[in-house]
């Protein structure tokens, strides 16, 4: 079993339902969820949209290889309604990012792990710090809580009421 961290986001449709559907599918198809952050409402990052995101981070124990995990997550996204347009950041029903896969550094055409920008994104760092504050970023060799404290992204990340 390998510990992996996934970032989930949704800003189209019934956002909370999309996150829950993704968590159920991940648990069945990718690996057991071992921890989950609270859900946060956040501003879009990298593009403008009138629709705010709901974001969260989960940890899973998986037997899937990094490549197989990525393919499984993409299949789940497609079933929940993600449309890949191939043109930068756009609103979406669901987005599932493979943030970390154990402490591996992976760089292929299909996959880069750790996710190359998560250390610059408050909407990832805040929920990740809730469940793994002392986890070391394997490329930067810094704790998640330190990355959050030093993050230059000051966009809104507010706890979403249950």
Image (cartoon, grey):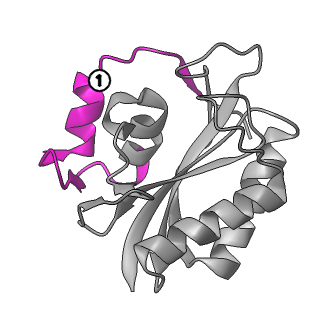
Left or right placement of residue 59 versus residue 19 in this view: left
Q: Which of 101 and 82 is in front in this view?
A: 82
* Residue 162 x %, y %: 74, 41
* Residue 97 x %, y %: 52, 51
The structure residue drawn at horizontal position 81% and vertical position 34%, both measured from the top left corner, is: 12
Occupied quadrant, residue 36 = bottom right
Badge 1: residue crowd in 10 Å (few <14, some 14–19, many ≥20): some
The structure residue drawn at horizontal position 60% and vertical position 39%, both measured from the top left corner, is: 55
Q: In this view, does 111 lie above or below 44?
A: below
Q: Which portion, as a residue range, is magenta?
A: 130-158
The structure residue drawn at horizontal position 56% and vertical position 79%, both measured from the top left corner, is: 31
Left or right placement of residue 144 versus residue 29 in this view: left
* Residue 78 x %, y %: 77, 57
Q: In this view, does 144 lie above or below 6?
A: above
Q: Which of 110 and 149 is in front in this view?
A: 110
Q: In which quarter of the image is the N terminus?
A: bottom left
The structure residue drawn at horizontal position 73% and vertical position 29%, both measured from the top left corner, is: 91
Q: Mark 1 points at which residue?
A: 151
Circle 1: element type: loop
């Amino acid at each position: 079993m390998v510990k992996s961290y996934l970032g989930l986001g949704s800003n189209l449709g019934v956002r909370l339902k999309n996150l829950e559907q993704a968590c159920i599918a991940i648990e069945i198809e990718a690996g057991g969820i071992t921890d989950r952050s609270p859900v946060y409402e956040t501003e879009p990052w990298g593009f403008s949209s009138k629709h705010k995101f709901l974001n969260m981070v989960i940890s899973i124990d998986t037997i899937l290889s990094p490549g197989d995990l990525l393919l499984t997550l993409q299949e789940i996204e497609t079933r929940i309604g993600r449309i890949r347009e191939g043109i930068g950041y756009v609103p979406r029903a669901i987005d599932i990012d493979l943030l970390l896969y154990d402490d591996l550094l992976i760089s292929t055409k299909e996959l880069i792990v750790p996710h190359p920008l998560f250390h610059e994104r408050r909407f990832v760092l805040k929920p990740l710090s809730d469940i793994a504050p002392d986890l070391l970023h394997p490329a930067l060799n810094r704790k998640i809580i330190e990355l959050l404290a030093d993050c230059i992204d000051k966009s809104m990340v507010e706890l979403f009421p249950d």
